[in-house]
Image (tube, rainbow, N blue to C red):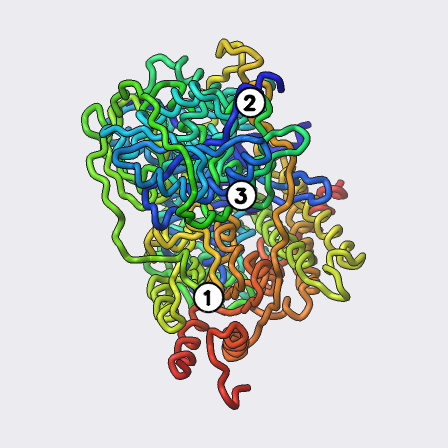
C-alpha cells in the first residue's frame, strides 16, 4: 500500500493573541505545531501499513520551516517527506492549495492507493482541502471517518454524518479525511526524532518542479480573498467568586433564583 | 557563530513540551502533595527514551547532543521540577559517566539498563561530614582479593529510593599510601547496601531523595569505574556535566515562573487596570525575562562546548551558579507579583519558589561554583 | 464586473435530511430573500432526491421564489458524486450568482467538491452574509483561528459565490400557506455511478438528546476528572429539568456520546441558562455556547478563559462542588 498523508503546519491556535488595534494576529512567541487532526491521519496511515504492508509519504505545502513538521511526521514513522515550497505558493486559499497538493500527488510514481487528511485545520477550519484534492484527482472521497478496515483493494469505513452512522465501502484509490478518536496519537520517542533528521529523506518541489503557472497558485490562483478581519462581539465577563464550597453554592443558588429557575426560599441568607 | 536552535532542536523542544504539559504538569501537583514518586510516569518516560538522552542508540539511548539534552531538561523542569531532577541526575551523573569511563563489559551490564530506564541511576557523593569539602569523605573502599569492600554513609541521594544502579564516590589507599578518590558502580540489590527513609523536603517533592549506607558491601573489581585512582578525574568530569543539567533544571523553573507571572499580571486588575500596566511590575518582569534569557545562553554555550569536546569547566560553573540564582530570584518575584494568592497552593508559584532554592545548593553550592570560576581565571 | 452581469440568482441547497431538527435550509431561504432583494433577483432552492415534492412545497411556504427539483431513484440517498454532478450541470446551465448550503456534515463535504469542479470560491461555516453596497459582492463572514477573529471573505471574480452557513445563525420565515412559487423539474442526464457504496446507514441511538431546545443545559468538561463525576451532571439536569452537553475532551475520554458535543464541530445552542463545569473555555467549545442568555462556569483555575464569558464564575473544584450542590438542591426541590 502506498499512502500519502497531507499535513499542515499551523500556529498553536490556543496560544494566539490578537492585536485588536491593527487587526492582526500576533505570531511572536507562538509556536508552530502540526495540525492536531493530521496526527490522527498519520496514525491511521501507520496502522494500515502495519497491517497491510506499505509505505508512507508525508506531504505539506508551506514556507521552508514547514520542514520541521515533515521531520516530526517522519519521526512518527512515515518513510519520506515531500515539501512543496515556493514564494509563489503563498497566500493560497483552499482552491489553490488543493491544486498544488493534487499536482504533487499526481507527480508521484507510483501513484498512491490512499490519500489521508485530517478533517479540518485549527486555523482555517474549512475542511475543504481534502475534498478538493479528491475532486482534482478524481478520487472517491469519504469525510470525517472514524473507523477504517481494509478489505482487499477496498476500505470499509464508518463515519457519523448528520446523525447517521454510515458504513461505507470505497474502492481504492481514494481519499479519506479523518476525525478524532480513531486511534490514540502516540508520544514520540526522542531517538526517533534524531533519526528523522539524520536518516530520512525530504524532497523539495517548487512551482517549476510541479510544472505550474503563477496564476494557478498562491494568491493569484485563489478565488477567495480575505477582505478584512474583525473581532467577534465582546464577550461578557461577570462576577468571579472564590472561597468555600458553601459560598460558591450560595452564589449559584442566588443566580438560579434571579433567573426564576428556582423559587426563593424564606429565611434564606 | 550560530546563535539559533537548529530545526531539530526546535522540534525536540516542542515535542517534549507537549508531553510535559500533558503528563508531567498535572502530576507535579500530586507529587508535591504526597511526596510519592510516580512509577507509571517514569515507565512511560523510559519508553520514550528520556533515560538515555545522550547515550548512543547502539546502547538503546536517544543519541542527542548536549544542547538538545539541556532543552529536554529545561522543558521537563518547566512542568515538573522533581521529574526534571530525576531525569538530569540519572542521565548526567549516572549514565553518562559510565558511558565516558566504562569498559565494554560495564557498558553492556550497566549502561544498557540505564539507557532503557529499566534501572534508575544515582551518584552518591555527599556525606554527613562531607558536603562541599569532598576531601573529608569517609566512605572507604578496601581491596580484598578480587573485591573491594565498601563502608560508609551517603546522604541526600537524588533518585535514591528507586534506583537500581548507584555510583559511589569513595576513597581507597592504593598500595597502602595516600587517600585517593575512587568510583564504584554498586547495584542496589548488593548485600550490604541499605537505603534509608525518603527525606521530607521543602521542594522537589516526589523525587525520592534518601540516604544510602554501605556496611561491608562487597563489590567485584569489575565494578570499579575508571582506573584505580582515576576517581578524581571521574568525579570532577561527572560533576562538570551534572552542572549543566542542574542549570537547565533551574532555567525550567525560572521560565515557568516568568510564564505564570506574565499571565497573572495581565489578568489581575487593581486600581482599575491590569497590574501589567504598572511600572514596578513591568520592571520585575523585564528583569526576570532578561536574566532567564542570559541563563539560557550560558547553558547553551556550555552545552555547545561539551558537544565540541572543549574544556568547559568554567562555563558549566557559570551556567549553574547564574541559572540557579536566577531561578531563586524569579520565583521570589513571582510570588510577589501574585501577591497574597502567590502564598496559597491555588497557584503553582509557591511550589516553584520552594523547588528553586535547592538549585543553589546541590551538585556544588554557588560558593563552590564561584571558587571553580575564580580558580580557573586566577590560578597561575 | 461586467462579466458577472450574466450571473443571476441566489440559490440555496435543499438539505432536507433530519428535516424537523435541521432547519438550516429554511434559515438560508430567509437570508437568501434578503440578499436577493438587494441584488434585485430571486431565491431558488435546489432539491435532489426521490419523492421530495413535499419539501419543495415547504420551501415555497417558507419563502422560496422557485424550487428546482431533480427526482430520481438514484438520488434517494445523499450521495456525493451524483449530487455534485447534477448541481454542476445546473449551475453551468443557469448561472446563479450566489449558491448557499447549510454547514451540515453533508453540505461541508459536497460543497467543496462542487466548488472545485466549478473552479470557484467557497467559504465555510459562515456566521454572517451581506451584500456590499458598493461592489455588490457577497461578504462572507467566517470564524478564523477557532473563532478568535472573524474573517470577511469575498470571491471577487469567480462565480457563483459559494458559502456554507452555520445552522442557527439566521432566522427562518414563518410558514405561509398562501405563499406562491414555481416548482420546476429541469432535465437531468444519466447519473454517474456512486463510487462509494453505502452498506448501512443507521440513525444514531435515539437518546432524544435535544440540546437545542433545552432551557437549561449543563456542560461537562475534562476538569470533572472521571466518568463518575460526569454522570452526576445527569442528576443535576434532572433536578433542573435540563439537558447535558459535553466538550470534545470529555467525549474523547469516553464520558459522553458524540451527540452531546457542543462547539465548532458539534452543536451551537442558545439556552436560557448554561452551566459549564470543569471546562477551561477553549474557543472550539465556546463558539457553540456564547449565544446562551446566562452562563455560569465552575473551574478550579481562576485564569481559565471560560470565566471571560461567564456571567457568574465560581472558582472551585467541580468534584467537590457538584455533589454538595446536588445535596442542597435535593432538599429544596
Instruction: Pick whichever, A73 or C32, lies toward us.
Output: C32
Tell me the residue at 45%/25% (across/down): C115
* Disc 2 secondary structure class: loop
Quadrant of residue B262 within the rendered picture = bottom right
Specify the label residue C127 is tagged with.
3
Q: Which residue matches tag 2?
A: A222
Secondary structure state at the residue bearing disc 3: loop
CB under 8 Å between discs 2 and 1: no
Residue B56 at least partly seen: no
Where is residue B281? Give x, y as percent.
75, 58
Structural crowding at the residue carrying mark 3, measured as other residues with C-alpha within 10 Å and reported as few (<14), some (14–19) or many (≥20): some
Seen in the image, is B130 located left or right of residue A190?
right
Residue that carries the numbered disc 1 in the rendered image: B35
For the residue pair C160 and B287, the one nearer the viewer reads as C160
Q: Residue at x 63, y 68 (%)?
A: B341
Q: Residue furthest bottom?
A: A267
Residue at the far front in the pictured view: C178
Amino acid at each position: 500500500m502506498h499512502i500519502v498523508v497531507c499535513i499542515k503546519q499551523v500556529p498553536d491556535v490556543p496560544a494566539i493573541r490578537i492585536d485588536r488595534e491593527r487587526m492582526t494576529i500576533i505570531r511572536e512567541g507562538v509556536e508552530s505545531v502540526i495540525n492536531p487532526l493530521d496526527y490522527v491521519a498519520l496514525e491511521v496511515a501507520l496502522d494500515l501499513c502495519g497491517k497491510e504492508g506499505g509505505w508512507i509519504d508525508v506531504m505539506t505545502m508551506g514556507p521552508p520551516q514547514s520542514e520541521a513538521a515533515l521531520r516530526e511526521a517522519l519521526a512518527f514513522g512515515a518513510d519520506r517527506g515531500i515539501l512543496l515550497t515556493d514564494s509563489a505558493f503563498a497566500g493560497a486559499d483552499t482552491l489553490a492549495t488543493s491544486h498544488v497538493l493534487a499536482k504533487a500527488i499526481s507527480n508521484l510514481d507510483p501513484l498512491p492507493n490512499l490519500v489521508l487528511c485530517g478533517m479540518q485545520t485549527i486555523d482555517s477550519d474549512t475542511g475543504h482541502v481534502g475534498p478538493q484534492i479528491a475532486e482534482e484527482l478524481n478520487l472517491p472521497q469519504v469525510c470525517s471517518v472514524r473507523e477504517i478496515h481494509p478489505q482487499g483493494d477496498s476500505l470499509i469505513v464508518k463515519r457519523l454524518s448528520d446523525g447517521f452512522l454510515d458504513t461505507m465501502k470505497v474502492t481504492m484509490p481514494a481519499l479519506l479525511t479523518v476525525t478524532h478518536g480513531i486511534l490514540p496519537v502516540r508520544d514520540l520517542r526522542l531517538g526517533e526524532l534524531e533519526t528523522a533528521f539524520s536518516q530520512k529523506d525530504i524532497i523539495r518541489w517548487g512551482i517549476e518542479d510541479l510544472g505550474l503557472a503563477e496564476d494557478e497558485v498562491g494568491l493569484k490562483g485563489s478565488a477567495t480573498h480575505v477582505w478584512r478581519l474583525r473581532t467577534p462581539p465582546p464577550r461578557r465577563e461577570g462576577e468571579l467568586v472564590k472561597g468555600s464550597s458553601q459560598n460558591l453554592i450560595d452564589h449559584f443558588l442566588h443566580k438560579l433564583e434571579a433567573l426564576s429557575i428556582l423559587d426563593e426560599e424564606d429565611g434564606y441568607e | 557563530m550560530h546563535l539559533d536552535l537548529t530545526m531539530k532542536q526546535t522540534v525536540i523542544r516542542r515535542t517534549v513540551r507537549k508531553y510535559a504539559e500533558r503528563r508531567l504538569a498535572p502530576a507535579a501537583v500530586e507529587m508535591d502533595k504526597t511526596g510519592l514518586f510516580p512509577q507509571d510516569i517514569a515507565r512511560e518516560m523510559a519508553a520514550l527514551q528520556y533515560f538515555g538522552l545522550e547515550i548512543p542508540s547502539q546502547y538503546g539511548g536517544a543519541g542527542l547532543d548536549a544542547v538538545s539534552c539541556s532543552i529536554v531538561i529545561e522543558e521537563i523542569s518547566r512542568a515538573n521540577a522533581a521529574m526534571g531532577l530525576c531525569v538530569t541526575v540519572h542521565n548526567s551523573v549516572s549514565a553518562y559517566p559510565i558511558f565516558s569511563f566504562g569498559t565494554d563489559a560495564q557498558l553492556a551490564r550497566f549502561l544498557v539498563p540505564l539507557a532503557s530506564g529499566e534501572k534508575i541511576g544515582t551518584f552518591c557523593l555527599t556525606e554527613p561530614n562531607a558536603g562541599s569539602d569532598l576531601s573529608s569523605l569517609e566512605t572507604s573502599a578496601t581491596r580484598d582479593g578480587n573485591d573491594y569492600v565498601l563502608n560508609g554513609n551517603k546522604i541526600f541521594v537524588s533518585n535514591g529510593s528507586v534506583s537500581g544502579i548507584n555510583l559511589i564516590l569513595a576513597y581507597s589507599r592504593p598500595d597502602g599510601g595516600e587517600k585517593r578518590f575512587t568510583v564504584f558502580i554498586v547495584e542496589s540489590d548488593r548485600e550490604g547496601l541499605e537505603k534509608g527513609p525518603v527525606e521530607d523536603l521543602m521542594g522537589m517533592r516526589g523525587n525520592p531523595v534518601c540516604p544510602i549506607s554501605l556496611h561491608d558491601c562487597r563489590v567485584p573489581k569489575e565494578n570499579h569505574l575508571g582506573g584505580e585512582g582515576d576517581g578524581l578525574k571521574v568525579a570532577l568530569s561527572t560533576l562538570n556535566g551534572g552542572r549543566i543539567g542542574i542549570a537547565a533544571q533551574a532555567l525550567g523553573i525560572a521560565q515557568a515562573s516568568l510564564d505564570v507571572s506574565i499571565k497573572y499580571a495581565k489578568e489581575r486588575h487593581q486600581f482599575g487596570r491590569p497590574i501589567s500596566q504598572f511600572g514596578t511590575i513591568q520592571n520585575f518582569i523585564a528583569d526576570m525575562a532578561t536574566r532567564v534569557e542570559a541563563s539560557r545562553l550560558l547553558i547553551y554555550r556550555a552545552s555547545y562546548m561539551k558537544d565540541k569536546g572543549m574544556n568547559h569547566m568554567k562555563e558549566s560553573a557559570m551556567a549553574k551558579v547564574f541559572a540557579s540564582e536566577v531561578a531563586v530570584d524569579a520565583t521570589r518575584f513571582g510570588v510577589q507579583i501574585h501577591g497574597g494568592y502567590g502564598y496559597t497552593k491555588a497557584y503553582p508559584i509557591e511550589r516553584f519558589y520552594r523547588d528553586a532554592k535547592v538549585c543553589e545548593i546541590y551538585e556544588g553550592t554557588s560558593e563552590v561554583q564561584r571558587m571553580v570560576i575564580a580558580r580557573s581565571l586566577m590560578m597561575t | 464586473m461586467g462579466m458577472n452581469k450574466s450571473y443571476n440568482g441566489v440559490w440555496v441547497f435543499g438539505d432536507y435530511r433530519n428535516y424537523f431538527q435541521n432547519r438550516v435550509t429554511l434559515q438560508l431561504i430567509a437570508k437568501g430573500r434578503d440578499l436577493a432583494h438587494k441584488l434585485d433577483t430571486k431565491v431558488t432552492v435546489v432539491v435532489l432526491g426521490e419523492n421530495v415534492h413535499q419539501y419543495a412545497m415547504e420551501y415555497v411556504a417558507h419563502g422560496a421564489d422557485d424550487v428546482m427539483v431533480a427526482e430520481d431513484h438514484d438520488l434517494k440517498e445523499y450521495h456525493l458524486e451524483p449530487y455534485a454532478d447534477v448541481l454542476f450541470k445546473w449551475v453551468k446551465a443557469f448561472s446563479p450568482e450566489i449558491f448557499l448550503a447549510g454547514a451540515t456534515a453533508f453540505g461541508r463535504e459536497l460543497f467543496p467538491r462542487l466548488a472545485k469542479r466549478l473552479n470557484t470560491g467557497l467559504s465555510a461555516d459562515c456566521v454572517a452574509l451581506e451584500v456590499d453596497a458598493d461592489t455588490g459582492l457577497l461578504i462572507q463572514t467566517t470564524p478564523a483561528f477557532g473563532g478568535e477573529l472573524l474573517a470577511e471573505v469575498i470571491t471577487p471574480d469567480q462565480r457563483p459565490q459559494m458559502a456554507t452557513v452555520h445552522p442557527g445563525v439566521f432566522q427562518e420565515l414563518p410558514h405561509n400557506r398562501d405563499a406562491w412559487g414555481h416548482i420546476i423539474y429541469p432535465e437531468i442526464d444519466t447519473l454517474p455511478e456512486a463510487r462509494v457504496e453505502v452498506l448501512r446507514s443507521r440513525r444514531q441511538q435515539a437518546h432524544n438528546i435535544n440540546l437545542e431546545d433545552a432551557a437549561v443545559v449543563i456542560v461537562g468538561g475534562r476538569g470533572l476528572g472521571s466518568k463518575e463525576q460526569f454522570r452526576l451532571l445527569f442528576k443535576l439536569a434532572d433536578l433542573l429539568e435540563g439537558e447535558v452537553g459535553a466538550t470534545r475532551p470529555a467525549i474523547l475520554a469516553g464520558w459522553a456520546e458524540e451527540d452531546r458535543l457542543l462547539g465548532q464541530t458539534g452543536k451551537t445552542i442558545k439556552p436560557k441558562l448554561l452551566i459549564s463545569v470543569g471546562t477551561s473555555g477553549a474557543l472550539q467549545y465556546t463558539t457553540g455556547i456564547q449565544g446562551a442568555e446566562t452562563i455560569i462556569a465552575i473551574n478550579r483555575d481562576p485564569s481559565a478563559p471560560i470565566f471571560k464569558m461567564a456571567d457568574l464564575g465560581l472558582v472551585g473544584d467541580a468534584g467537590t462542588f457538584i455533589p454538595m450542590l446536588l445535596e442542597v438542591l435535593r432538599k429544596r426541590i
